[in-house]
Image (cartoon, helix red, strand yellow):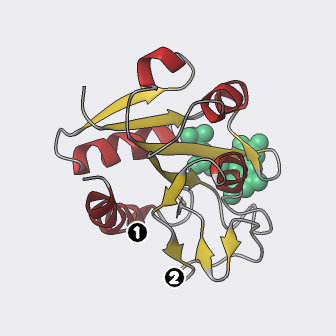
Amino acid sequence: MNKIAILYGSSGGNAESVARQVQDLFDGNADLYNVEYVSIDEIKDYPYFVVGTSTTGIGDLQDDWDGFLPSFAGMDFTGKKVAIFALGDSASYSTSFAESMKVVYDELSDKAEIVGRVPDEGYTYDESTAVIDGLWVGLPIDEDNEYDMTEERLAKWVETLKEEFV
Ligand SMILES: Cc1cc2nc3c(=O)[nH]c(=O)nc-3n(C[C@H](O)[C@H](O)[C@H](O)COP(=O)(O)O)c2cc1C
């Protein structure tokens, strides 16, 4: 078992693909779990988590996370750190861009240390509840419109996470 667990929920494959890229960037030091199939017992001992979700509905959590998040949030997060990424579509859903990360943040922020916030620069959208004081509560990724920026965004983000997850 590594120290880092990447947990993802993905409806069409984009969040899964991003989760796999994140795993690669951790150079073999992270384990990957689809929340559709994972149990709390399998993941409860990890100190560090990367939580990935796509956004559905209007700013809603990906369906598999809907079922899993309440039990995940019920774990003991003492000493644990969580980083969040969310997939979204900043053109078609410009007023709820990547808001699913805020659902995760609201569930976990009083229990775990949330790391990996990123500045709200270089994103084009109208509104998102996931930005607090100019910082996203996690990393937004837009595979629908800005897929050419994903590699660079992930590389920068994972470098910052490597300093947190030690
Ligand atoms: C029904 C539906 C609702 C969506 N709602 C939002 C939304 O509110 N905000 C947003 O940023 N993206 C929204 N999206 C865009 C998806 O989050 C985006 O396409 C994402 O890359 C899908 O990832 P997945 O393939 O892992 O499910 C929506 C997509 C669909 C199909």
Q: Position of residue 12 (x, y in %)?
A: 58, 35
Residue 53 vs 133, above or below: the answer is above
Query: Assess mark 1: CB under 8 A from ligand 1?
Result: no
Q: Residue furthest front?
A: 78
Q: Secondary structure at mark 1?
A: helix
Label 2, label 1: how far apart the Cα atoms are: 10 Å
Q: Position of residue 51 (x, y in %)?
A: 51, 43
Residue 160 vs 73, above or below: the answer is below
Three-letter amino acid code at the position of disc 1: Met
Mark 1 — residue? 149
Q: Residue furthest left?
A: 27
Q: Secondary structure at mark 2?
A: loop
State yes or no: discs 2 and 1 in contact (Cβ < 8 Å): yes
For label 2, the crowd category at 10 Å Cα-Cα, with few meaning under 14, some 14 to 19 and many 20 or more, is few
For label 1, the crowd category at 10 Å Cα-Cα, with few meaning under 14, some 14 to 19 and many 20 or more, is few
Q: Residue sitting at 81 percent across and 44 percent down? A: 57
In the rendered structure, the answer to whether residue 91 lies left or right of residue 95 reads left
Residue 9 vs 136, above or below: the answer is above
Query: Assess mark 2: CB under 8 A from ligand 1?
Result: no
Position of the N terminus by quadrant: top left
Q: Residue sitting at 76 percent across and 77 percent down? A: 126
Mark 2 — residue? 122
Using the image, tell me which numbered label, if any, was put on residue 36.
none
Q: Position of residue 93 (x, y in %)?
A: 75, 61
Task: Kindly report which numbered mark, 2 or 1, lies closer to the viewer in this rendering.
Answer: 2
In the rendered structure, the answer to whether residue 54 lies left or right of residue 27 reads right
Q: Position of residue 60 (x, y in %)?
A: 77, 46
Residue 130 in which image quadrant = bottom right
Q: Is residue 38 visible?
A: no
